[in-house]
Image (tube, rainbow, N blue to C red):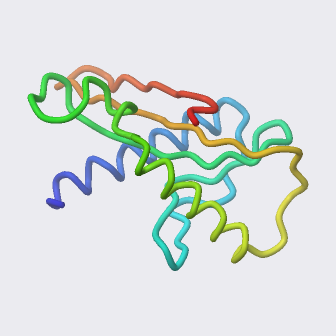
Amino acid sequence: MTVARQRLGRRAEQLAAQRLAARGYRIIDRNARTRYGEIDIVAMHRGTLVFCEVKAGRAGTAVGPERPALAVGPRKRRRLRALAAAWLAEAGPLPWFEEMRFDVVGVTYNGDRPPAVEHIRNAF
């Protein structure tokens, strides 16, 4: 992955975390590392533990899905479930929660325009 692509991803994760926090999500962990990989954002929202994958892209590119959020396919979903299980096993004491879910936030950059943010709750 190029440095420019990494920078774009970090900006998208920061924007996603800000948007989630503004909507009442309490960010518990960012770039949560497990021995199997990394979860972009772990948050609490109204008694739900949310594991959030953030995808970034540029508008009008010929490669990749139509929207960044669509880049989370079956293989990535399986991996995120495994990462969540590992994170739960490795995490210290957690706030009380009733349920868990997986969200996807896609951020599309289009030149000088503000980025478009698509939040898919309970994506899988």
Q: Residue furthest left?
A: 62
Instruction: Name the spot of residue 49 as percent of width and height, x first.
Output: 75, 48
Instruction: Using the rendered view, name the quadrant where residue 67 is placed.
Output: top left
Looking at the picture, how far across and down is residue 55, in whole percent? 37, 41
Q: Which residue is pictured at 83% across the width and 64% down the height?
A: 94
Residue pictured at 25% horizontal, 20% vertical? 113
Quadrant of the image for the C terminus?
top right
| Image point (35%, 46%), residue name | 11
Picture residue at 63% right of the left edge, 32% below the top: 122
Query: In the image, is residue 14 above or below residue 33?
Result: above
Residue 21, position in %: x, y? Answer: 64, 39
Find residue 26 and report its horizontal and vertical position in percent.
72, 46
Relative to 31, is 73 above or below? above
Q: In this orientation, which residue lies closer to the viewer: 115 or 121?
A: 121
Front position in the image: 90 or 42: 90
In the drawing, does residue 105 fall left or right of residue 86?
left
